[in-house]
Image (tube, rainbow, N blue to C red):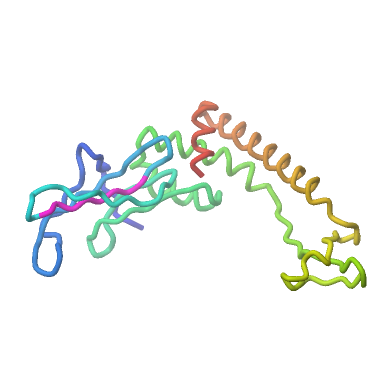
Amino acid sequence: MLKIIEKQPTEENPYIVDNYPYGFRLKTKIRYWVETTKRGQRFISQTLNPKTQKWNKPKKSVYSNIILIGLNEKGYITYTNLNLYSKEEAENFYNNYNKFFSEYQHKEYKAITGMLKVYDKVEYKVSVRRFRHKVTKEITENIPLMEINQYEEINENNQVVNQEEEQKQQKDLNRRLNYLAVESAVKEGVTEKEALSSFKRS
């Protein structure tokens, strides 16, 4: 668990470290902060060019739903993050770090929690794709790429799979799950707009 910085750095009030290595011999400053946009949050670091005394182009992490900056066991700056992955992960993150959450992060967590209540109940079935030769009627799970047009995909009842219908059913199912996830997030106390924004970031 990280030692979280109590007052989380922003671009206006970043966390600054002196004597940061710059090249082989030089030392400089580096600053860190969390950027929040409509796409989520990301960790930013930026070094000062000791030769020009101008800040270099900032380095940015990928977006996450929630990011908190802290110090690792060696005292170096790093960060921890939360995305829409699992209910257990979200709860552990909340229990460890919620006292450091901003208002934005509390709302984001409520949205994540609501969505995970729906997705936590979803059961996934992994099935092996099966193919039947159009002429010999031989059934196989592996077909040479160059012979793909000689086979047709079949389901567990040995019926030819209607690809368009299957894709339509999958889209309808995803649309329904997404609707239920957003609806569940709203019940946690966030607006529909906030829930939709959080969902798109995940």
In the figure, 115 relative to 26: above or below? above
Is 58 on the left or on the right of 40, as rendered? left
**From the image, which quarter does the N terminus lie in?**
bottom left
Residue 39 percent location from the top left of the image: 43, 39
Residue 147 percent location from the top left of the image: 78, 70
Residue 90 percent location from the top left of the image: 49, 48
Is 111 on the left or on the right of 17, as rendered? right
> Which residue occupies 16% across, 49% down?
16
Most prominent secondary structure in the magenta stretch? Answer: strand
In the figure, 188 relative to 174: above or below? above
72 and 25: which is toward the camera? 25
Whether residue 156 is in magenta: the answer is no
Magenta-tinted stretch: 42-49
3 and 141: which is toward the camera? 141
In the figure, 189 relative to 98: above or below? above
> Which residue occupies 80% across, 45% down?
165
Is 162 on the left or on the right of 116, as rendered? right
